[in-house]
Amino acid sequence: MELTINGKTYTFKFGIKFLKALDEVYFVDANGVKFGAGLEVGLAQLTGTRNPVALAEFLLAANKTESPRLGETTLDDYLETDADIDALIDETIKELTESNVTKGKVTAALEKAAN
């Protein structure tokens, strides 16, 4: 997935490192042990409430390994002024259903939510 922001093209990859980055943001702490829950918690916010903050977290995590790197302020400004957030959420969900790493869990979650 690619986005052009302020004349720069940024690439987003929804792979293993994306999941690891999300697990740093969304996790469960059980007796001092952290369990990553990035995709599960973030996806619920992205699909259920269409939360723009969750969208920002997903995009930052997906760009973390790519070049050029997208800064949080640049992304926030883009989302606040130029982005069609609903379309971008839909595009992000589509990418998640196509990524080899996320498609199984995301497709199952979407099917469960539809029923």
Image (tube, rainbow, N blue to C red):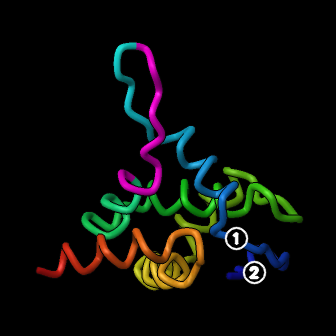
> Which residue is the extreme one toward the top?
31
Tell me the tag on residue 57.
none
Q: Where's the C terminus, which quadrant? A: bottom left
Magenta range:
32-41
Amino acid type indicated by mark 2 = Thr
On-image quarter of the N terminus: bottom right
> Residue 71: x and y, percent?
75, 53
Pointer 2: residues within 10 angstroms few (<14), some, or many (20+)? few
Residue type, label 1: Lys
Q: x%, y% of residue 95?
A: 55, 81
SS under mark 2: strand
Mark 1 Cα shell of 10 Å, populated few (<14), some (14-19), many (≥20): some
Residue 52 falls in which quadrant of the image? Answer: bottom left
- Measured Cα–Cα span from mark 1 to mark 2: 15 Å
Q: Quadrant of residue 18?
A: bottom right
**Front label number (1 vs 2):** 1
Q: Element at badge 1?
A: loop
Quarter-of-image position of residue 44: bottom left
* Front one among 108 and 47: 108
Q: Which residue is mark 2?
A: 4
Rendered residue at 57%/38% (across/down): 24
Give the labeled residue for mark 1: 13
Residue 60 against residue 81 in the figure, above or below: above
